[in-house]
Image: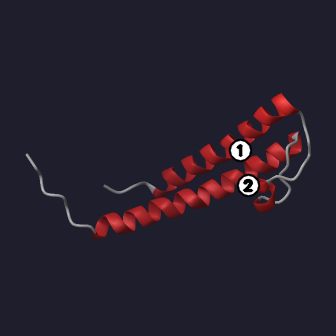
Amino acid sequence: MKLNVKAVALSGGIVWGLGLFILTWWIIAFEGQTGQQTIIGLVYRGYNISAMGSLIGLVWGFVDGLIGGFVFAWLYNRFASKSLPIPNAG
């Protein structure tokens, strides 16, 4: 079975981008906007715990998830086509 590379890439981008956006607002709701640099902010330039940082994280997360999903599905398809079929145990 092959994966649809575009579908996996798009869903990875949406999940990762929205996840980072929601996580940022979750932190803002309980701790307030700090504007502090985070570990994620070291990787995603411009990201911090603020309203603008959540939008920057959404964009960076979408792009990162898109690339990660693409690479995952592409590698899966490459390796799955080279593997031997599993014999039916029934």
**Residue at the image point whose x is 51% and y is 55% from the top:** 6
Label at residue 20: 1
Label 2 sits on a secondary structure element that is helix
Relative to 20, 14 lies left or right: left
Report the number of numbered marks: 2
**Viewer-side label of 2, 1:** 1
User: Relative to the observer, which residue lies in front, 11 or 44?
Assistant: 44
Q: Mark 2 points at which residue?
A: 60
Q: Find the distance from the CA under tag 2 to the CA under tag 1.
A: 9 Å
The answer to whether 49 is drawn above or below residue 81 in the figure is above
Measuring 62% from the left and 50% from the top, which residue is drawn there?
13
Image quarter where the C terminus lies is top left
**Circle 2/circle 1 CB separation < 8 Å:** yes
Q: Which residue lies furthest to the top in this view?
A: 29
- The 10 Å Cα crowd at callout 1, few under 14, some 14 to 19, many 20 or more, is many
Residue extending furthest left? Answer: 90
Measuring from the top left, give residue 26's x and y in whole percent: 76, 33
Q: Give the left or right position of residue 39, taking residue 80 as reference.
A: right
Q: In this view, does 85 lie to the left or right of 24?
A: left
N-terminal label among 2 and 1: 1
Q: Element at badge 1? A: helix
Mark 2 crowd level (few <14, some 14–19, many ≥20, 10 Å Cα): many
Q: Where is residue 45 in the image (x, y as percent from the top left)?
A: 82, 60
Q: What residue type is labelled 1?
A: Leu
Looking at the image, which residue is at 74% across and 41% down?
A: 21
